[in-house]
Image: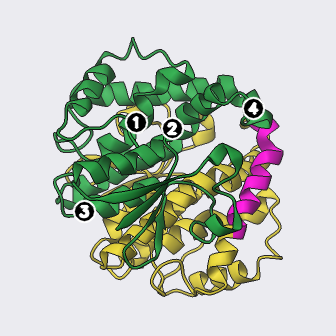
Chain colours: A yellow, B green
Amino acid sequence: MLRLYDYLESGNGYKVRLVLTQLGRPFERVELDIYKGASRTPEFLNRNPNGRIPALELDDGTYLWESNAIIWYLADGTPLLPAKPLDRARVLQWMSFEQYSHEPNIATVRSWVLHPKDGDDRRVMTPIKRQLGYAALKVMEGHLKTNPFFVGGAYSIADVALYAYTHVAHEGGFDLKPFTAVNAWLKRVKSQPSHIPITKG
Amino acid sequence: MLRLYDYLESGNGYKVRLVLTQLGRPFERVELDIYKGASRTPEFLNRNPNGRIPALELDDGTYLWESNAIIWYLADGTPLLPAKPLDRARVLQWMSFEQYSHEPNIATVRSWVLHPKDGDDRRVMTPIKRQLGYAALKVMEGHLKTNPFFVGGAYSIADVALYAYTHVAHEGGFDLKPFTAVNAWLKRVKSQPSHIPITKG
């Protein structure tokens, strides 16, 4: 059975849990307390040398890491990943945007708010990261004003990737109220079949 | 003809130029001085609302942005992107690693060294980014000690993505000498057919 190394609060872990659940794939979850170094032990570094969750142990005993690579692998050939080459490239475009322009700002500030001892040396970046997080939300708002979902008019892993940290952005102090199109999209994503909340392990 | 909005010094732009050249695809290049705001004009934001190069104008007049999404789109169906689903997921894994753990550290420090007025407020992060950049190089070194390329034993866009900013890391003050496996890999990538240097527009 697929085994997911995970941390419940992590949006990156949630992406994988959500996709596995929506595809009806059974999996075993191993919770690691990443704030106590559980993803940096020699044992875990043999699974992911980059020392991060999520990491998925496959049936052949090898590991796949990086949340967006994992959900791509799971979703390929299902309705969660479109078939047309250009649509697939646009899914990757929005997932790259998420990992570069969205997550390092919105998710990082959230983790610093939720874990007051985390990131001490880096907290000087909080105001800049907050500004960059709002800039990412503005890009999403612009797209969602005229599109129900990120790619091809249908729910896909591009939406999963961006939903993961957007729907908990308020936990990092981001005010989502002005982003009306984003809020409508959050509701659409939440109403998809077999949706689960981030709190469900 | 494909039109690439680009900046010669950018490793992200270079990834696309290199793949287009190695695939023998003709393209027109539009150079934007990103340090003078050319990627943040209203006109360019209509091409990429995230205000970054590279952006590729396709034959149908639409735009694709995010370097790794663009090279995936171009390479799909060619020897630069493997066919097996798990190999493809591992290409995405290493490209995600590049955009999250490598580029924001190695490329950003290089841009601050090359452009002394860039990133003033963020330069306080230089020592941390340098440390994280070396951590990324260490992950690459570990993998390349027992693998000639990043995925499936063959040159792919995973190598292109990681080569782009690794081969110029010294311009940001990174000392690559201790990374012997990385250096041997850099030579293997450079010796691929139709390779071009980052300085070729």
Q: Which-is-in-front pick, marks 3 and 2?
A: 2
- Where is the N terminus of chain A found, in terms of image quarters? bottom left
Give the percent coordinates (x, y) of residue B150. Answer: 27, 39
Q: Secondary structure at mark 2?
A: loop
Residue B140, percent across and down?
36, 30
Boundaries of the magenta span: A120-138
Q: In the rendered structure, find residue A54 and report the number of the disc placed on it.
A: none
Q: Which residue is mark 4?
A: B117
Q: CA distance from mark 4 to mark 1?
A: 23 Å
Q: Earlier in the sequence, mark 3 or mark 1?
A: 3
Asked whether disc 2 touches disc 1, contact meaning CB atoms under 8 Å apart, the reply is yes
Q: Are marks 3 and 2 in contact (CB under 8 Å)?
A: no
Q: Are marks 3 and 4 on the same chain?
A: yes
Dot 3: element: loop
Mark 3 and mark 2: span between their CA atoms? 26 Å
Q: Is residue B25 magenta?
A: no
Q: Is residue A151 left or right of residue A172?
A: left
Q: Which residue is disc 1 drawn over? A: B198
Q: Amino acid at mark 3?
A: Asp
- Left or right: residue B58 versus residue A192 is left
Could you say where residue B59 lies in the image, as x and y percent from the top left? 36, 75
B62 up-or-down from A148: above or below: above
The amino acid pointed to by label 2 is Glu
Q: Earlier in the sequence, mark 4 or mark 2?
A: 2
Residue under disc 2 on the same chain as residue under disc 1: yes
Query: Residue B76 — which label?
Result: 3
Q: Which residue in the structure is indicated by mark 2? A: B9
The chain ID associated with circle 1 is B
